[in-house]
Structures are given as structure tokens and as C-alpha cells.
Image: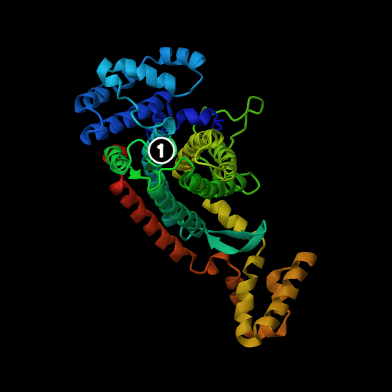
């Protein structure tokens, strides 16, 4: 299980995310949770404060003999106990008696995984703020850039590129809001013990869990059952929806950058090789990575839903699925958002090619415009019939749309040839696309700025 990488991965700025994916960061997060647990237990008089202090001092990855931990795994047959044994050795003998006191493995590991994920979440939000800013710049710059609107893979009526980008903006904002809401429920501390009812500590366990949560800057799990997984499923689903929006952008760039369309292209640096056999190739490397990783991410919510239904108070098969699914989801979304940031920052818009493509049908794309003007006199249904017959005539016989329209007496009475020619210009029929683009660009800038402002200082 891993994200899908290629050479582009090595050159992208990672916003400090990849360092949090390192295995040592996982071990340090286990230590951080154990340290917070000991601190809270010391403050509540559950363990001696001197022991709590020493456990905190020892909870550094450099104090842990990782090689010894790996050797112990071969004989102990447990994924976490070897870690505890080498951690206890790093503490004073008396303090070591209170390491991992009254909790179970999954309390530490699941809390620690969500602790790391919360840090990654903040850095991903930083990337998303930059993506919004890039999209805002694109929408503002190209709010009046005319292009073909397409439905069912064919020309429909004209739009502006800024309008197209405004669609991406609104979906990105929706995903950010969805992810932020899910985060409130996801990053929770679970210290309920083996079955989640604080059997070791009784009522004091509720207070203990709250204190651990404060120390880790996380939320507390109201019912700390190991069988509750909906918060993780929700977060992974939110990541999948975020990836889906960026997948849409990548598909659009991928398809409209082909030579036959040529409306946009990814940024390109001299020296980049697209093929070992075809020297001319300039491939959409960013887009293909977004598409591939997004598609893999879509499989994870279903996996989580299946695992979530396991019975009883805990099940290791369920935990294994969620541990792997969350880890893989983070790796996949990292690849998706980093590529999207670089893609949206460097996308080249070929304005002249867009204008040329918008005129390929020689006015047919504006048939609705003609129809709605005729409808003022003839009514919608009759106007549709008139324009439909002329449009089909043009496409089957190859005649001029202007001339075909003027053959109709109603059209001839209402419009001159020059008026019809003017009405068939793509730029004459883009609706409020430029206004929408401008509004969404402003919204993108505003929300991007707010995200940056609200982030913890180290992640801004």
C-alpha cells in the first residue's frame, strides 16, 4: 500500500508534509502520547509526579533503541510491546514501572496516528490555501477569455475560462469546509482502556482523558470505544471528495492539452524528458499523477465502511484496516494536493486557441442566442423549430448558418445579415460567466487568506 509516485514527486515542494510521514515520526508520536498520559496521571495523582517527569524526559526518539525493538518483535509476537520494552529501558527503573499505566495498545497507537494526521491536516490546509489563491488568479485573469462550453463531449454554448475555473473554486471551497468539519470530530484522544469504559480508572478516567487531550491539543472522545470508527471513515471520505475535485481539474487539463484541442498546457522546464523512445514528447506529468492517486483513494471509504461493521468492543482485523487505510489516504492525498498546487500555479492558457476553437462551428454554438431572440416574437417552441431546422441543414449540407437563417421569412424580417453575424460571435453569448468568475476569484482570495491566518504559526 502506497501512493503512486513518479519523477515529479521528487521535485515538488512538499510544505513539510513528507517529514511527518516518516516512520520515526510515528514512533515519536507514540512517545508524545505516552508522555502526555504520564503527565496527566502525575497531575491527577495516579502515578508519582517524579515518574511522570522522567517519562517525559525519556520520550525522545533518540533515546529509543529501535534496533533492539525490531529484534524483540521476532520473539514477542506483538507490534507494540517491543516498543514499550525499549521505552521502559530509556526511563529510570522506578519510573519505568508507570509507563503505559492503565491503558491498552490501541489507546496509544490510534491516538498517536490521529495526532500526526492532525499535524498533516494543518499543512494540507496550507497547500489548499495556495491552490485557492492560484485558482483565484486564473479566474480573475481569464474572466473574459472566451472558449467553447462543452456538454456530452461536444460544443454547447460559449463560456469564459474564468467561469470554468469558478466551478473548480466552489468545489475546492466546499471540500475545505467539509474537511474542516470532519476534522473537529476526527482528531480525538481515546484513553478508555481495553473496552473503552475506563475500567482501570473509573470516573477519574474521564478527567484523565480530557487532560491528555488538552496536552496534545486534540479533542476528547465522548465514548472512547475502540469499535467507533465513523470519525476516521468520515475524514477519509472527505479526503476522497477533495481528491475528486482536483481529479476533475486534472482530467480537464489532460484532455484539453492534446494537440487537437491545445487550449491549455502544464508548465514545462527545459530538460524534462517525456519518453525514452519519442524525443518530442511533453507529457502531462502532474495531471496523470493526480488522476491515478485520486482513483486509488476512492477505494478506501468503501473499505472502511466494510471494516466498521465488525461486532463487539474491539477487533484487530478492523483496526488493521483503519490503520492502513488512514495511512494510505494521507499518502495519496499528499501526492494529489502537491501536484494540484504546482499544476494550478503554472498552467498555461492558450487564449487564441480557445477563441479559434470557439469559432469552429461558425456560429452554430450561438444557436440558442438566435432562438431566444426569435422567441420574443414567435414564442419559444416555434423559434426552436426554426433554428433547429436551419442548424441541422447547415450540418448536413455544409451551408452557411447566416445564409440559412436568412432564408426564413421571420428571421429575415427581424434581423439584418450584419446583425445575425454579430449575434453569432462567441463573445456575444457568455451570459454572466465573467461576473461569476470575478465573484468566485474574490471569494477564493478571501478564504485563502483566512486559512493562512488561522493556521498554527509553524504550518502557515
Can the viewer see residue 415? Answer: no
Quadrant of residue 198 in the image? Answer: top left
> What residue is at 40 percent from the left and 38 percent from the top?
114
> What residue is at 52 percent from the left and 57 percent from the top?
164
Residue nearest the observer in this picture, 456 or 196: 196
Task: Find residue 349 and report its horizontal and vertical position in percent.
Answer: 51, 49
Total count of labels: 1
Residue nearest the observer in this picture, 161 or 38: 38
Quadrant of residue 397 in the image? Answer: bottom right
As drawn, 311 above or below 24 = below
Which residue bears the numbered disc 1?
A: 114
Quadrant of residue 104 in the image? Answer: top left
Task: Find residue 318 and report its horizontal and vertical position in percent.
Answer: 54, 37
Left-right relation of 399 to 197: right
As drawn, 88 above or below 355 = above
Task: Find residue 189 and report its horizontal and vertical position in percent.
Answer: 36, 40
Can the viewer see residue 449? Answer: yes
Task: Find residue 220 and report its horizontal and vertical position in percent.
Answer: 34, 45
Q: For the residue labelled by badge 1, is the local secondary structure a helix, a strand or a loop?
A: helix
> What residue is at 35 percent from the left and 54 percent from the top?
447
Quarter of the picture containing the C terminus is top left
Amino acid at each position: 500500500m502506497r501512493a503512486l509516485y513518479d519523477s515529479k514527486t521528487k521535485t515538488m515542494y512538499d510544505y513539510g508534509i513528507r517529514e511527518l510521514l516518516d516512520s520515526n515520526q510515528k514512533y515519536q508520536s507514540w512517545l508524545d502520547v505516552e508522555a502526555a498520559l504520564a503527565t496527566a496521571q502525575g497531575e491527577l495523582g495516579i502515578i508519582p509526579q517524579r515518574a511522570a517527569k522522567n517519562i517525559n524526559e525519556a520520550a525522545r526518539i533518540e533515546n529509543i533503541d529501535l534496533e533492539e525493538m525490531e529484534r524483540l518483535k521476532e520473539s514477542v509476537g506483538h507490534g507494540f510491546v517491543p516498543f514499550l520494552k525499549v521505552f521502559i529501558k530509556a526511563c529510570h527503573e522506578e519510573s519505568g514501572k508507570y509507563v503505559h499505566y492503565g491503558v491498552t495498545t490501541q489507546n496509544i497507537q490510534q491516538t498517536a496516528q490521529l495526532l500526526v494526521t492532525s499535524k498533516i491536516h494543518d499543512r494540507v490546509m496550507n497547500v489548499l490555501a495556495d491552490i485557492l489563491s492560484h485558482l483565484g488568479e486564473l479566474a480573475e485573469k481569464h474572466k473574459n477569455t472566451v472558449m467553447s462550453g462543452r456538454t456530452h463531449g461536444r460544443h454547447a454554448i460559449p463560456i469564459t475560462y474564468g467561469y470554468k475555473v469558478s466551478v473548480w473554486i466552489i468545489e475546492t471551497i466546499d471540500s475545505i469546509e467539509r474537511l474542516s468539519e470532519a476534522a473537529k470530530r476526527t482528531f480525538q484522544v481515546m484513553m478508555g482502556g481495553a473496552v473503552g469504559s475506563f475500567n482501570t480508572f473509573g470516573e477519574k478516567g474521564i478527567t484523565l482523558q480530557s487532560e491528555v487531550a488538552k496536552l496534545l491539543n486534540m479533542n476528547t472522545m465522548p465514548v472512547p470505544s475502540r469499535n467507533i470508527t465513523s470519525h476516521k471513515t468520515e475524514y477519509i471520505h472527505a479526503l476522497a471528495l477533495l481528491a475528486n475535485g482536483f481529479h476533475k481539474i486534472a482530467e480537464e487539463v489532460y484532455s484539453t492539452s492534446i494537440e487537437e484541442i491545445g487550449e491549455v498546457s502544464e508548465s514545462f522546464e527545459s530538460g524534462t524528458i517525456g519518453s525514452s523512445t519519442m524525443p518530442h514528447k511533453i507529457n502531462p506529468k502532474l495531471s496523470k499523477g493526480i488522476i491515478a492517486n485520486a482513483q486509488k483513494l476512492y477505494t478506501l471509504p468503501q473499505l472502511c465502511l466494510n471494516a466498521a461493521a465488525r461486532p463487539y468492543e474491539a477487533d484487530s482485523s478492523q483496526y488493521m484496516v483503519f490503520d492502513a487505510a488512514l495511512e494510505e489516504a494521507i499518502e495519496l492525498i499528499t501526492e494529489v494536493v502537491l501536484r494540484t498546487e504546482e499544476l494550478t500555479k503554472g498552467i498555461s492558457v492558450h487564449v487564441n486557441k480557445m477563441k479559434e476553437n470557439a469559432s469552429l462551428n461558425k456560429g452554430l454554438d450561438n444557436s440558442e442566442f438566435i432562438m431566444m431572440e426569435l422567441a420574443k416574437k414567435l414564442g419559444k417552441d416555434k423559434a426552436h423549430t426554426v433554428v433547429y431546422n436551419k442548424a441541422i441543414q447547415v450540418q448536413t449540407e455544409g451551408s452557411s448558418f447566416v445564409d440559412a437563417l436568412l432564408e426564413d421569412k421571420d428571421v429575415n424580417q427581424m434581423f439584418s445579415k450584419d446583425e445575425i453575424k454579430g449575434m453569432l460571435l462567441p463573445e456575444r453569448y457568455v451570459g454572466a460567466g465573467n461576473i461569476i468568475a470575478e465573484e468566485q476569484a474574490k471569494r477564493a482570495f478571501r478564504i485563502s487568506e483566512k486559512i493562512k491566518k488561522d493556521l498554527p504559526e509553524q504550518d502557515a
